[in-house]
Image: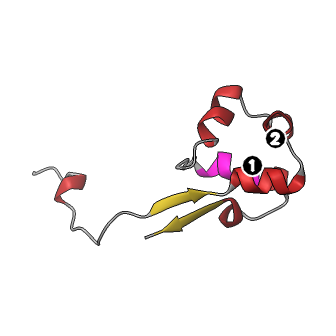
Amino acid sequence: MPTSHAADAPSHGAPASVTCLLPQLLAARGMSWGELARRTLLPAATIGRIRRPDADPPLPVAERVAAALGVAVEAVWRHQR
């Protein structure tokens, strides 16, 4: 039985990119990265990774961050084609 690879799948255009609006949301709330870490109980390494402009965290992490800010996940990370 042949195996299937992602590279064999049909392409539907360019992959979506993610825009992280987290720095702007934190600034608007006067919240530090440390306060975000405290509210989410996420490790420092995870906070470091989501600080990047191209951050695309796993859904559970995105949900914790959004909940800490009182917004929807889509308000923090936006997919664009």
Is 10 colored magenta in this rendering? Answer: no
Residue farthest along the left direction in this orientation: 1
Query: Where residue 22 appears, x then y in whole percent?
Result: 70, 52
Mark 1: which amino acid? Val
Q: Is 24 positioned to the left or the right of 14 in the image?
A: right
Q: Are marks 1 and 2 in contact (CB under 8 Å)?
A: yes
Instruction: Identify the residue at horizontal 75%, vertical 48% (top origin).
Output: 64
Q: Is 8 positioned to the left or the right of 73 in the image?
A: left
Name the residue nearer the viewer: 25 or 65: 25
Label 2 crowd (10 A; few <14 / some 14-19 / many >=20): some
What label does residue 36 carry, if any?
2
Instruction: Identify the residue at horizontal 64%, vertical 33% (top origin).
Output: 48
* Secondary structure state at the residue bearing disc 1: helix
Vertical order, 52 against 75 (above or below): above
| Mark found first going from the N terminus, 1 or 2 | 2
Mark nearer the viewer, 1 or 2: 2
Name the residue nearer the viewer: 3 or 29: 29
Query: Where residue 23 appears, x then y in whole percent?
Result: 72, 50
Q: How is the image coloured?
A: secondary structure
Quickly name the residue at label 1: 65
Highlighted range, magenta: 59-66
Mark 2: which amino acid? Leu
Residue farthest along the top direction in this orientation: 44
* Quarter assignment of residue 51: top right
Query: Where residue 44 appears, x then y in whole percent?
Result: 70, 27
Instruction: Identify the residue at horizontal 83%, vertical 50% (top origin).
Output: 68
